[in-house]
Image (cartoon, grey):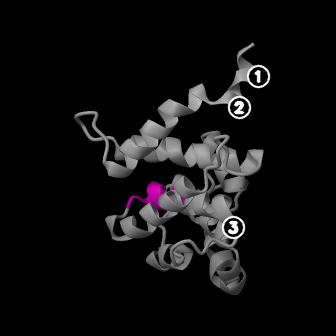
Amino acid sequence: MRVDGLTATCQDPKNFYGHNLIDKLQNHLNVSSQHFQSNKFAYALVVLALCNANATVDAAYLKDISTPNGNYRFGVDEAAMVYLAYACVNDAAYSTQSKAALEYILQKRDSKGSYGNEYSTALAVQTLYNALQNLQAADSSFSEIGHRQVKKTKDFPNSSSLQRYRN
């Protein structure tokens, strides 16, 4: 999280008071790979931090955050983090895994428009916003998955669950 914080404030995580936090993060990934295999949310968060810091993201890390379709131990939160990591790296070789994470999230939306608790919903919305930007073509059209989500999103403001916020 420090790497993301430093990157967000335009500081260099490779030189944080004389410490290269990128090297430390990559070393931690290599040493603690067993732990990260069981926690893809944390693993994807680290991959995202490396990507946001413009560090080299090893292909092994991208392979490791991949998960069989629908097998997200931490549900929407994990699928969102995996999608965001793949979207940041933007490697076409992982488009199938990226789309699978997005599909998982799309399927988990409940009748009130949320994705579980407020934290899961926030991650899902961040992911969907990113996906809509990535799925929109130069002519402003959307792919099939993007078109389906835009349609759902257009219906959402008419949801009865939002009526209490309109007054």
Q: Residue at x 69, y 67 (%)?
A: 42
Query: Which of the 4 image quarters holds residue 113?
Result: top right
* Above or below for 117 versus 65: above
Q: Which residue is mark 1?
A: 164
Marker disc for residue 84: none
Numbered marks: total: 3
* Closer to the camera in the image, 49 or 105: 105
Return the residue found at the far top: 167
Other residues around mark 3 within 10 Å, as few (<14) / some (14–19) / many (≥20): some
Which amino acid lies under the numbered mark 3 shown in the image of this protein? Ala
Position of residue 107 in the picture relative to residue 3 (left or right): left
Q: Residue at x 64, y 44 (%)?
A: 111
Other residues around mark 1 within 10 Å, as few (<14) / some (14–19) / many (≥20): few
Magenta highlight range? 84-90
* Residue 49 sits inside the magenta stretch: no
The mark that comes first in sequence, 3 or 1, is: 3
Dominant SS of magenta comes to helix
Residue 87 in picture, x, y percent from top left: 45, 56
- Quadrant containing the C terminus is top right
Q: Which residue is mark 2?
A: 161
The mark that comes first in sequence, 2 or 3, is: 3
- Quadrant containing the N terminus is bottom right
Label 2, label 3: how far apart the Cα atoms are: 32 Å
Q: Which residue is mark 3?
A: 42
Which amino acid lies under the numbered mark 1 shown in the image of this protein? Arg
Give SS at disc 3. Answer: helix
Do the residues under discs 2 and 1 have CB atoms within 8 angstroms? yes
